[in-house]
Image (cartoon, rainbow, N blue to C red):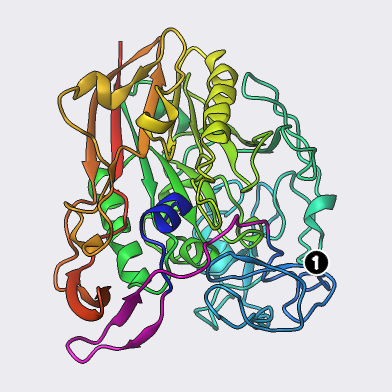
Amino acid sequence: MPLAIRNFHFLRSISLSFCPKIQNPRITESTPSHTLPTPLKSPSSRDQRPVSMSSSSSSSSWPCKKCTFLNPPSAKPTCQICLSNSSPSPPASPATPKWACKSCTFLNPYRNSRCEICCTGASASKFDDLKDTTSDIDPSVGSVFFPLRACSSKRKREDRPIQDEGGDVGGGREDGVPVGEFRGIKASSKGVGEDRSSFLGLSSVKILSYNVWFREDLELHKRMKAIGDLIQLHSPDVICFQEVTPTIYEIFLQSSWWKFYCCSVSSADAYERPYFCMQLSKLPAKSFTCKPFNNSIMGRELCIAELEIPLVVATSHLESPCPAPPKWDQMYSKERVDQARELIPLLDKNPNVIFAGDTNWDDKLDGNFPLQEGWVDAWAHLRPVENGWTYDTKSNRMLSGNRTLQKRLDRIMCKLQDFKVSGIEMIGMEAIPGLSYCKEKKIGKEMKQLVLPVLPSDHYGLLLTISRQ
C-alpha cells in the first residue's frame, strides 16, 4: 500500500465496527486532518534488550506499528494518526525442539525440513527424538544469520559482520554501514530441493513482482493465502515482494510453498522494520545484498539477488508521494527520479539484469523512466497498446469508493545479453471466491454502505518470463 495512494488520492481515517450484513470489518472513510508520514526503522519486536523507542518514552519518538506514523516524544500511549495503542514486545514463546543443520550448525525449528539459513535438508535421524510441542514459531528462529556462528537469540544485529561476496553487485558489509553503502549476506550455493546441475539447462526463468499490501485489518490471512495460491499456480523461479510486514512474513513462513525457496530476509531481520522488500529464489543464489538509497527519507533501498546462472534480479519500493498540510505538495518526485537514476547505472554493469518492483512512477510527474541503452521496459516492449495499470481503482473492485487512480506503478525493466523477454502478464486480478467486506463511505453528508469483494492486494502482480537466446 504505497503512501502515495493512501495519502494523495484518498486520505482517510479508518475505524472498525461490526457490519450487520457480513462477518467482516467495516471501514469508514473520511478526510482526516493528518497524513501518514514517513515510516522509519523500528526496533525488533522480538528483541529482548531494552530499547529507547517505547510508547511511554518522553525523550524519543516512536513509530506506530499499525500505520507506521512516527509519533513525537510524548507520554501519551496512543498514535496521533490511527489512535492505536503502542504495544510492548510480545513475550517469548516457550522453547521448541530444534535440530542442528549439518552444514551450518544453525538450530532450526522442529517442523522445518530444510535449514532456514543455508537450505540444506535435514537428515531423518535429526527427528528421531523430537516432538513438536507448539505450533508457534519460536522467537529465536533466524536470530543467527550469515556469517554462520553459534546460535544466540540475544546477539545484536549491529554486531553481526557480513561476508564480502564480491561480484558485480557489491561486496557485503556490516548492517550498520553508512547510508548508500552495500550490506549483504551469503546465499546458499545449493538449490532448494533440486541438484544445482539441474538448473544449468534452464530454457526459461519466471520472475514475479508483487506489492502484497501491508494493510493487516482487511482479511490479511486469506489475502496472503490467495497470493500463495498464485505462487503455486505460476511457480515463479524468483519472487520480488514489496510491503512485507513481520506478520505477513510469518504467514508466508508457515506456507507449504515456502520450503521451495531461499529467502533474502532472516526471521530476526524481518522484525526490524514495519515493512520491507523481500526476495525469494528457487534457483541457486550467490548472494543477496541491499543498498540504501542516498536520498531516501522513507528507508527505501535497492535489494539485489545474484544467481548462480548468469542473472541478477533486483527490486525496490521507490519513494512514495506523501502530500500533507499545509501545501499538499510533498510528492517526492525528485527523490524518486534520483533513486531510479542511481539504481540503473548500478545494475547496468551486469550482462543479464532485471529490475522489478513498485516504482510509484507517475509518467506525467516524473517523466520517462531513466533507462540506459540496452534496457527495455518489459510491459511497454511486449504489450505497447495495453495500459498496464497495476493499480486501478475501477478494475479492482475492492478499491471501489476510492478516488479514481489508474497508474502503472509496478514495472519490470530488463537488460539481457543471454536471455530475451518472452512474456509478461498481470496476476491477482480476480476476487477471492466467497469473500467480501463491508465499507462505509461518506458522500456529502450521507454515509453509504458498500459490500465489496476482496482481492489478494490493492496492486496486481507482474509475472515476467525470459527465455534463453
Left or right: 385 in relation to 231: left
Left or right: 164 in relation to 85: right
Picture residue at 42% right of the left edge, 53% below the top: 8
Residue 306 inside the magenta-drawn segment:
no
- Quickly name the residue at label 1: 154
Quarter holding residue 202: top left
Picture residue at 49% right of the left edge, 59% below the top: 113
Identity, as a three-letter code, of the amino acid under mark 1? Lys
Left or right: 212 in relation to 159: left
Q: Is residue 175 or residue 364 the one in the foreground? A: 364
Q: Is residue 19 something that shows in the picture?
A: yes
Q: Dominant secondary structure of the magenta stretch?
A: loop
Q: Position of residue 127 (x, y in %)?
A: 55, 68
Please, what secondary structure does the residue beneath circle 1 have?
A: loop
Q: Position of residue 53 (x, y in %)?
A: 76, 70
Q: Is residue 392 or residue 265 the one in the foreground? A: 392
Query: Mark 1: few, some, or many residues within 10 Å (few <14, many ≥20)?
Result: few
Q: Is residue 307 something that shows in the picture?
A: no
Q: How many marks?
A: 1
Left or right: 392 in relation to 118: left
Relative to 20, residue 232 above or below:
above
Picture residue at 36% right of the left edge, 60% below the top: 10
Relative to 115, residue 218 above or below:
below
Residue 28 inside the magenta-drawn segment:
yes
Q: Quadrant of the C terminus?
A: top left
Which residues lie in the magenta part? 14-41
Picture residue at 72% right of the left edge, 64% below the top: 43
Quarter holding residue 378: top left
Q: Position of residue 208 (x, y in %)?
A: 35, 40
